Amino acid sequence: MPDDPTLPEPPETPETPGQPLQGVAASDGAPPDPVPTPTDPVPTDAVQAGPPPGRAMVGAQQLALGVMVFLAALLLLLGATRILVRGGIGAGPSPSLAIAGSGGPPSPTPAPSASAGSTAGGSATSGGSAVPSGSTTPSESSTPTADPVLVGAGDIGDCGTNGDEATAALLDGIDGTVFTAGDDAYPSGTAVDFQKCYDPSWGRHKARTRPAAGNHDWESQGLAGYLAYYGAAGQGAGGTSWYSYDLGTWHIVVLDSNCDKVGCGADSPQGTWLAADLAASHSTCSLAIFHHPRFTSGEHGNDPVVDAFWRPLYAAGVDVIVNGHDHDYERFAPQDPDGKVDTKRGIREFVVGTGGTTLRGFQKTVANSEVRLSNSWGVLKFTLHGGSYDVEFIAAGNDFRDRGTAEKCH
């Protein structure tokens, strides 16, 4: 397009921030000033005058902008850190057991849980559940104000697996009273079985353990190996294999479900003792432990014989029953002795035969089974509050977790 002679000449534009630097074509198409070379001496007045005013302004503004960006980034970082700390990033609160599911990533090792254990020794009750003096009883925690913890499993010591070592390692990081749910030493519960297959692992927690007897424990001359190993900590008044004790505000009942050996009916010595013990207890919350499960999806199937335990326990308002025998983990919805869901007075049953012996699969899923696991050893941990409880199954070497909080005791 030819130049229009009527248009005035454009004024000379001074160098401003954003104008192309030397060596880059200007926006008006004019060639840039030549860059001085060794053959082109720099004028003396240029050296004395310093850089052009526009370039100094660019440098100052770029420096100021950089400082502002740095400060803004620092403030954002500090703010994010405060949010993380105040927000407590991590596992959220456990859901109610009414809706609890499995899963949730575990910590690499279980976090220690403080336990009172102040009454774990099993003081005498009017039900006749005294632990003889001089017995080996669970040790007390150094934090007596914390809610007590009860943790353990059944089907434990087996020289043919390393499962008991894995679950004992879990116990190493959990304070509180340790329970067993029977079949503590394989294959036959002899003194040798206890010394070789149980003591090297769970034996280091013996001083805080309250056991229950299983059918394998009875294979050794009438429970002789079991009784000799645990002493008074595994016996009730008169040397019985059933007893009870209080743990915090909770009443814990330990029964012997080898009914062909000791009798379980209402008119048997154990049945008579159980009725008296439950009647004498004034605890709002209670939990029972014995080996054979009334309801199970495992290999052995439902055991109607221990209905003799379920009916008085249900009538007394017991909240939880813990069993072993089937080598798996299973949680049930609250139910009555007939296996019907009862959300008001039902007993929640846990099968936790995952202490260390060989694991087994499930045969069929029975009614009211909520969660099942058959490929990992583990322990079941209860934190016993005044009026409710938290529960968590902790697997060994596996990211499975089943946990929740019961709303309240019966």
Image (cartoon, rainbow, N blue to C red):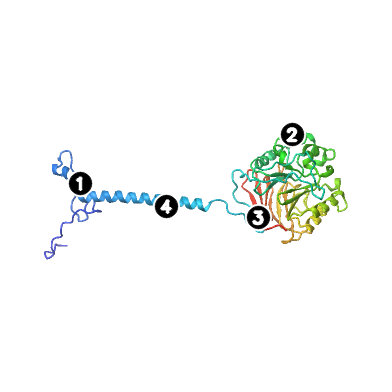
The alpha-carbon separation of the residues under discs 3 and 2 comes to 37 Å
The alpha-carbon separation of the residues under discs 1 and 2 comes to 88 Å
Residue 239 locus on image (x, y percent): 83, 42
Residue type of the residue flagged with mark 4: Leu
Q: Earlier in the sequence, mark 3 or mark 4?
A: 4
- Say the numbered circle drawn on residue 394: none
Residue 272 locus on image (x, y percent): 85, 51
Residue for point 63% across, 42% down:
173
Circle 1 residue: 51
Viewer-nearest residue: 275 or 28? 275
Query: In the rendered view, does 374 fall on the left or right side of 82?
Result: right
Circle 4 residue: 76
Q: Are marks 4 and 1 in contact (CB under 8 Å)?
A: no
Residue type of the residue flagged with mark 3: Thr
Circle 3 residue: 405
Residue type of the residue flagged with mark 2: Lys
Q: Earlier in the sequence, mark 3 or mark 2?
A: 2
Asked whether residue 32 is in view, the answer is yes
Circle 2 residue: 196
Residue 117 locus on image (x, y percent): 69, 45
Q: Element type at marker 3?
A: strand
Query: In the rendered view, does 352 fall on the left or right side of 6?
Result: right
Quarter holding residue 9: bottom left
Viewer-nearest residue: 373 or 225? 225
Residue for point 16% across, 43% down:
48
Query: In the rendered view, does 69 fall on the left or right side of 335?
Result: left
Which circle, 4 or 1, is nearer the viewer? Answer: 4
Position of 354 relative to 308 (above/below): above
Q: Earlier in the sequence, mark 4 or mark 1?
A: 1
